[in-house]
Image: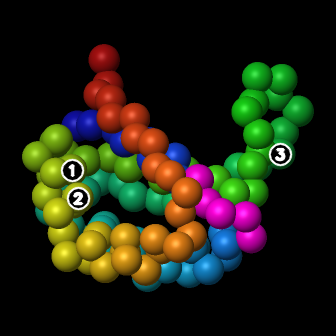
């Protein structure tokens, strides 16, 4: 199993329409072979001193996949291509962390 944390930085003021597209995408991804978990999250304000943020222009996607191969297949899925086209004007950048339990 692998874990993926995708940090998506958005243009100001577009989080709501971005999340509408993401809600369309989520059940399609969850139905993919090898998908264990797939969820968009947004920052929560806390008093924890080491917290970075919160930021209203960032969406963090928490994912679990059975394997790196399943992640590769996910990246190439037709609905991911459609998603990228739908959100291209919303997204400034994406950073991924791919890790495994130890």
- For mark 3, what is the residue? 45
User: Does residue 66 appear anywhere in the picture?
Assistant: yes
- Give the percent coordinates (x, y) of residue 31: 24, 71
Badge 2 element: helix
Q: Classify 10 Å Cα crowding around label 3: few (below 14), some (14-19), many (20 and above).
A: few
Q: Which residue is mark 2?
A: 75
Looking at the image, residue 49 sits to the left or right of residue 41; the answer is right
In magenta, the rendered stretch is 9-13
Q: Residue furthest right?
A: 47
Given residues 7 and 65, the one toward you in this image is: 7
Which quadrant is home to the C terminus?
top left
Residue at horizontal 16%, vertical 51%? 72
Local SS, label 1:
helix
- What secondary structure is the magenta-colored segment mainly? loop
Q: Secondary structure at mark 3?
A: loop
User: Which of the 4 quarters of the picture holds residue 82?
Assistant: bottom left
Q: Which residue is mark 1?
A: 71
Q: Residue at x 29, y 70 (%)?
A: 80
Magenta region includes residue 11: yes
- Contact (CB < 8 A) between labels 1 and 2? yes
Quadrant where the N terminus sits is top left
Residue drawn at 27 percent across, 73 percent down: 81
For mark 1, does the 10 Å Cα neighbourhood hold few (<14), some (14 to 19), or many (20 or more) residues? many
Pick the front one: 34 or 87: 87
Q: Determine which quarter of the picture holds residue 28.
A: bottom left
Image vertical order of residue 71 relative to residue 97, above or below = below
């Amino acid at each position: 199993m692998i874990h993926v944390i995708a940090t998506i930085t958005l243009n100001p003021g577009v989080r709501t329409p971005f999340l509408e597209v993401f809600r369309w995408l989520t059940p399609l991804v969850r139905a993919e072979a090898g998908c264990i978990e797939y969820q968009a999250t947004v920052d929560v304000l806390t008093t924890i001193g080491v917290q970075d943020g919160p930021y209203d222009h960032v969406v963090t996607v928490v994912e679990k996949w059975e394997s790196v191969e399943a992640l590769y297949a996910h990246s190439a899925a037709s609905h991911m291509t459609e998603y990228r086209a739908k959100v291209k004007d919303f997204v400034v950048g994406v950073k991924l962390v791919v890790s495994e339990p130890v």
